[in-house]
């Protein structure tokens, strides 16, 4: 910085008005401030950031780097937002952000739960699993062990589950889906050959009347056959049967169908114990949920013909 002697300030009434100026006018205001006895502040112009080089003034030096001490850094996995250039940071916890990996969990499987603290300045602080207290709010989560491993229970249908995390004074919840992978593994209906969702639909979660050989509606058709035909096992009027036949164009038969089942028409030209043959155009016909008609329009030899209908799950 250039220094200026206050005694050299030009005076309009001085004879020196005609003499050449010997001081640059650009520094005059600073010289006045330095000399004024009623002011204590002193301006010392200098670069504050040398962009990685040393910046200095008569009173201090600064070693800095624009590249690493400023700005915001963001990482996606794990999700972290950090602001640099501060010796320390004071913040308030705003909320918890929770994640599950994988986000959709198979029944009987496990998922890693993770929590992040979202701060009041929108930055994110990663939290160690041991810092979080986890609990199950609802749904088929059998347990949450350390460090944040959630174990899914067996289910009879795709089911939502909600877990809760707490950290210091804040808490958050996360809801995800537990997928029904096996159709016959849900206790106490596991391994009996009947679809668990069908058993729960008609008998609730734990009912001995749901057993395959039981016939709780006393219509002579047990639950195994009621399930195969997707009829109502609690309604004695509901079971699979042929409702009528017609010989106008070959042979036609009609019956109440289920939209969740498929139907095939077979024929035999001898006795019922003979060889059954399916009709190509009447094989695995999708049910409609209404009355369905299957037809054999081809003339068959012999005095007698026999027909039957097979029903299978989709
Ligand atoms: Ca299941
Ligand atoms: Ca079952
Ligand atoms: Ca029955």
Image (tube, rainbow, N blue to C red):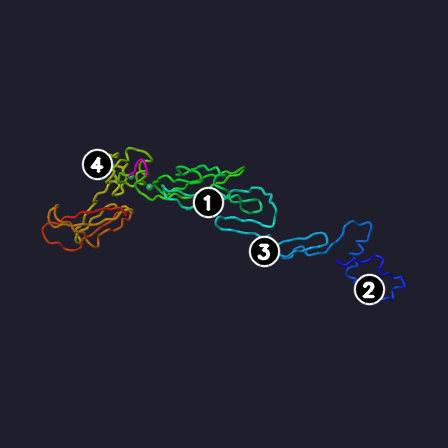
Crowdedness of circle 4 by 10 Å Cα count: few (<14), some, many (20+)?
A: few
Where is residue 290? Give x, y as percent. Answer: 28, 47
The overriding secondary structure of the stretch rendered in magenta is loop
Where is residue 189? Give x, y as percent. Answer: 30, 37
- Confirm or deny contact between disc 1 and disc 3 (CB under 8 A): no
Q: Earlier in the sequence, mark 4 or mark 1?
A: 1
Crowdedness of circle 3 by 10 Å Cα count: few (<14), some, many (20+)?
A: few
Where is residue 156? Give x, y as percent. Answer: 34, 40
Distance in Å between CA atoms under marks 2 and 1 = 72 Å
Say whether residue 32 is magenta. Answer: no
* Mark 2 or 4: the one toward you: 2
Q: Earlier in the sequence, mark 2 or mark 1?
A: 2
Q: Earlier in the sequence, mark 1 or mark 3?
A: 3
* Mark 4 or 3: the one toward you: 3
- Confirm or deny contact between disc 3 and disc 2 (CB under 8 A): no
Q: Earlier in the sequence, mark 3 or mark 2?
A: 2
Distance in Å between CA atoms under marks 2 and 4 = 123 Å
* Image quadrant occupied by the N terminus: bottom right
Distance in Å between CA atoms under marks 3 and 2 = 43 Å
Q: Is residue 239 left or right of residue 8?
A: left
Badge 4 is on which residue? Answer: 220
Which residue sits at x=21%, y=36%?
Answer: 220
Q: Is residue 93 left or right of residue 253?
A: right
Q: Earlier in the sequence, mark 2 or mark 4?
A: 2
- Give the numbered dot on residue 283: none
Badge 1 is on which residue? Answer: 99
Badge 3 is on which residue? Answer: 67
């Amino acid at each position: 910085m250039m220094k200026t002697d206050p005694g050299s300030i030009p005076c309009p009434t001085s004879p020196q008005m005609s003499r050449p100026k010997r001081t640059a006018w650009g520094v005059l205001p600073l010289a006045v401030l330095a000399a004024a006895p009623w002011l204590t502040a002193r301006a010392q112009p200098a670069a504050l950031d040398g962009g990685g080089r040393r910046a200095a003034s008569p009173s201090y030096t600064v070693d800095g780097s624009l590249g690493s001490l400023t700005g915001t850094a963001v990482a996606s996995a794990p999700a972290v937002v950090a602001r640099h250039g501060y010796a320390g940071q004071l913040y308030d916890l705003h909320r918890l952000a929770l994640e599950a990996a994988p986000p959709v969990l198979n029944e009987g499987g496990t998922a890693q739960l993770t929590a992040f603290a979202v701060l009041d300045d929108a930055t994110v602080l990663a939290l160690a699993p041991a810092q979080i207290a986890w609990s199950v709010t609802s749904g088929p989560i059998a347990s949450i062990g350390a460090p944040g491993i959630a174990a899914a229970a067996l289910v009879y249908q795709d089911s939502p589950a909600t877990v809760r995390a707490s950290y210091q004074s804040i808490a958050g919840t996360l809801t995800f889906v537990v997928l029904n992978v096996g159709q016959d593994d849900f206790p106490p209906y596991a391994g009996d050959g009947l679809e668990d969702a069908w058993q729960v639909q008609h008998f609730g979660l734990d009912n001995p009347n749901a057993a395959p050989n039981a016939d709780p509606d006393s219509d002579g058709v047990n639950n195994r056959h009621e399930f195969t035909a997707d009829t109502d096992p609690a309604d004695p009027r509901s079971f699979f049967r042929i409702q009528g036949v017609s010989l106008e164009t070959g042979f036609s038969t009609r019956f109440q169908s289920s939209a969740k089942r498929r139907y095939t028409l077979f024929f035999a030209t001898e006795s019922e114990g003979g060889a059954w043959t399916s009709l190509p155009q009447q094989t695995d016909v999708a049910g409609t949920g209404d009355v369905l008609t299957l037809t054999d329009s081809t003339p068959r030899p012999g005095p007698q013909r026999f027909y039957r209908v097979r029903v299978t799950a989709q």
